[in-house]
Image (cartoon, rainbow, N blue to C red):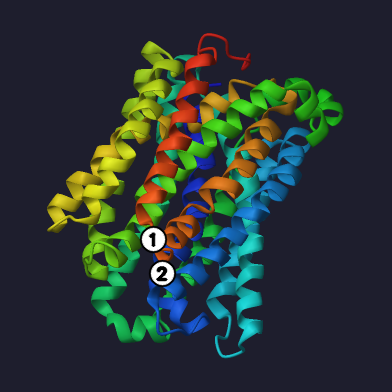
Amino acid sequence: MQDRQRLRNIIGGSAGNFVEWFDWFVYSSFALYFSRAFFPSDDQTVQLLNSALVFAVGFLARPLGAWLMGRYADRAGRRAALALSVGMMCGGSLLIAVIPTGLGLASTLLLALARVVQGLSMGGEYGASATYLSEMAQPRTRGFWSGVYFSTLIAGQLTALLLLIALQSMLGDAALYDWGWRIPFAVGAALALVVSWIRRGIDETRSHQAESQGAAQESTGWGLLTKYPRETGIVIVLSAGGGMGFYTYTVYMQKFLVNTAGFAKDVASQVVTGVLLAMMVLMPLMGALSDRVGRKPVMMFSYGAGALLAVPALSAIATASGPLQAFLLCLVPVVPLAGYNALSGILKAELFPTRVRALGVALPYAISQALFGGNAETAALAFKKAGNEAGYFWLIATVMAAGFVVAALMRDTQRHTLITQ
């Protein structure tokens, strides 16, 4: 395959990842506004907690989506799974954009249904797109492209935040509370349609073409657990720490700055935007570093530093006196976290053979995210409501420490990769 063709395929696969995560994060970015419409209450923490519970519902659907779409990607092909996942995300976003908010419980159930559809989509997207990229990229640059791939995730989240900042400036809080929060969901649905068209033109990977016959027998949940228990466990533990860290320092951080540190909503959005921009720059660099020194040293640094810095960093952010100080303090745990994020897709893909790779990447990751990443915001708000917010800081440190132990004991997947094509 020529370099230009390979690059076109990588961009096509990653473009969908951008849109998927834009649609996913629009929910959390605009929860400060639509939570009042769906969950009327005099207590903002209660409003946010209820919206966070619905956010977690989407994560509970991700293991099912990972199982269904992972098997589909291993059997029908990576390209077919990528097209299906982005179409489902379009439907979920469109539903949220048009849900009436005056129906009481019915409105809440429709919101939860839309998040379930998006969760099914995200469960399949991660495994299919990470597998596609790992099989399409050349061995000497897989870490770099993995970092670029995860940067498209950040770009989706960043675009959601930039749209929030723009709408805050143009419409103001009153209009956003009333109807403006629907705009980003409509935008996400439209973008998904564009990417669905783009993905029709990408090529299938040679790895899948060479070994697709064996996938029918091995690409099952039971086959994954019985034949690859060690690899499955590695993905679950690493995803737990990385997921909690990511959703705490990016998704929940916006609410943490407002609800705990006392910043205005627009200032908090600007601080998190700066953090995301820094992470986008860091991840390709971390990925390229792993191409030189190996995946294992980068992962050990990421989890070791993450465990040591969680409590002091979050405690300091809670008392930050200005936006610049808050931004610099947020960077302290985000720099090492970028190491895991950069290698999140490629390291997992290198653990599994082709015929079970998409399911192996997607299912244990989705299970871990449903238990840890998806509940990070809910757990943080529950600790705060109970008057023990610092307890959540120690929880992150503990999960990160478990990730460090696993990273220290595992083999370096760059030198022992199972990607052969």
Quadrant in the rendering for residue 221: top right
Circle on res. 30:
2
Horizontal side of residue 12 vs 275, given as left or right: right
Question: Looking at this view, is 29 or 92 the one in front?
Answer: 29
Query: What is the x, y in percent for residue 73?
Result: 72, 38
Sequence order check, earlier mark of 1 and 2: 2
Residue at point 44%, 34% (across, down) = 400
Write the residue at 60% across / 73% down: 111
How many neighbours does mark 1 have within 10 angstroms: few (below 14), some (14-19), or many (20 or more)?
many
Please name the amino acid that badge 2 sits on.
Phe
Residue 326 position within the rendered picture, expressed as x and y whole percent measured from the top left? 19, 52
**Residue 190 appears in the rendering:** yes
Asked whether, in this view, residue 203 is left or right of residue 146, the answer is right
Is 88 rendered above or below residue 81?
A: below
| Contact between labelled residues 2 and 1, with CB atoms less than 8 Å apart | yes
Q: Position of residue 76 (x, y in %)?
A: 77, 38
Give left or right: position of 159 versus 273.
right
**Could you tell me which residue is drawn at 74 percent across and 33 percent down?**
74
Assign the N terminus to one quadrant of the image: top right
Spot occupied by residue 350 in the image (x, y as percentages of width and height):
58, 21
* Element on which disc 2 rests: loop
Specify the quadrant of the image occupied by residue 342: top left
Report the disc number at residue 160.
1
Residue 406: mark: none
Task: Label 1, secondary structure: give it.
Answer: helix
Amino acid at the residue labelled 1: Ala
